[in-house]
Image (tube, rainbow, N blue to C red):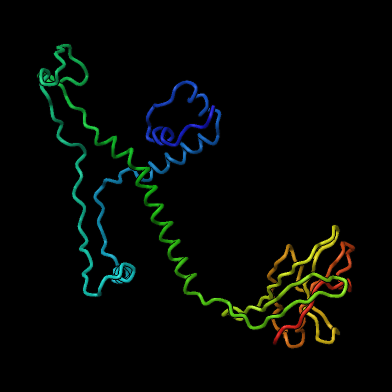
Amino acid sequence: MQHIDDETLALLALGEDVLDDDARAHLSSCPECADAVARLARVVDAFDGADAADELVAPDAAVWSRIQAELGLTSATAAPPVVAPAAVTDAPTVPTLPRDAAGTGAEAPDSTTGATGTAVVVPLASRRRRVWVPVAAAAAAALVVGGVGGILWERREVEPPETTVASATLDPLPDWQGASGDARVEERPDGRRQVVVTVDAPVPEGTYREVWLLAEDLSGLVSLGVLDGTEGRFDVPDGLDLAEFPVVDVSEEHFDGDPSHSGDSVVRGPLDV
C-alpha cells in the first residue's frame, strides 16, 4: 500500500478517525507515516489555544522604517496602529430550527433534538479552527523562512564582490600541443586570495592534474592542490608573495606516492603581477 496522503495525516493529528482497516494496518507498520503524524500532532499541541486573546506589543520604530523602505512608502506614511484582538468566546449561540422547517417530519428524539422538539444545529466553528491550525503553522513557517531568505539575499547583494588582481594565459608545453588554459587571481575584501584555473586538455587514464605556483626561473615551487575536472579554485597561502612565484603551472601526475612535481607540465603561463 502506498503512503497515507498529507490531508489524511493532518486529520489524524487532529484526532479524527478517518482510516479504514488497510490504512490503519499500514500506519502501524510504517515508521515514516507514524513519524509524520507525530510531528503534525506536536504542531497541533503547540498551537492549541491559538485563539486566546494575546496582548499585542507595538513593534520598534525601526521595523516600520524597514517596511517603508521595502514598499517605497514616503516617510510621512504613518505606522498602522496596534489593535488588540477581539475576545473569542468558547462557542457561539446555538441556533435551532423547528422540526417541520427542517423538513424532516420525524418525531423520534435523538442526540441532536432538544426537549421542545426542535432540531439543534451543531456548530462547526471549533472543528474548523482546529483544521486550520496546521495550515496557520505552515504559513507562519513559510513567512519566517521567506524573511530569513530575503535577509540573506540582501546581505549577499551588498557584499562587495571579489576583485581580479592578476591573470595569465596558460600555453601548452611541447608534449601537449592543443591544450590551453587560463588563470586569474581573485582577492576578497577581507584580503583572502584565490587562484582560479581553467584547463582544456585530455586526462589520460591513471593520471591527475596538479596546480602549482613557480618562481620565474623555475628555482622554487608551491603546490596549490589537485585540479578536479576542467576548472578549480585554490587558496593562496597567507604571506605568499606572488611576485616571487608568478608562474601558474598545471602538471600531469601519476598515482605513485611522490608529492614532488612530475616534470611533465601540461600548460604554463606567467601572471601579470
Going 78% across and 75% down the picture, which residue do you hit? 212
Residue 155 percent location from the top left of the image:
47, 70
Residue 15 percent location from the top left of the image:
38, 32
Q: Is residue 165 above or below residue 251?
A: below
- Horizontal relation, residue 55 to residue 66: left or right: left
224 or 198: nearer the viewer = 198
- Horizontal relation, residue 20 to residue 207: left or right: left
The N terminus lies in quadrant: top right
164 or 33: nearer the viewer = 164
211 or 10: nearer the viewer = 211
The C terminus lies in quadrant: bottom right
Residue 211: quarter of image: bottom right
Residue 267: quarter of image: bottom right
- Horizontal relation, residue 98 to residue 165: left or right: left
Residue 265 percent location from the top left of the image:
84, 73
In this figure, what is the number of numbered marks? 0
Residue 39 percent location from the top left of the image:
46, 41
Residue 95: quarter of image: top left
Going 80% across and 66% down the picture, which residue do you hit? 209
Going 21% across and 69% down the picture, which residue do you hit? 78
In this view, the residue farthest toward the front is: 178
Going 20% across and 36% down the picture, which residue do you hit? 91
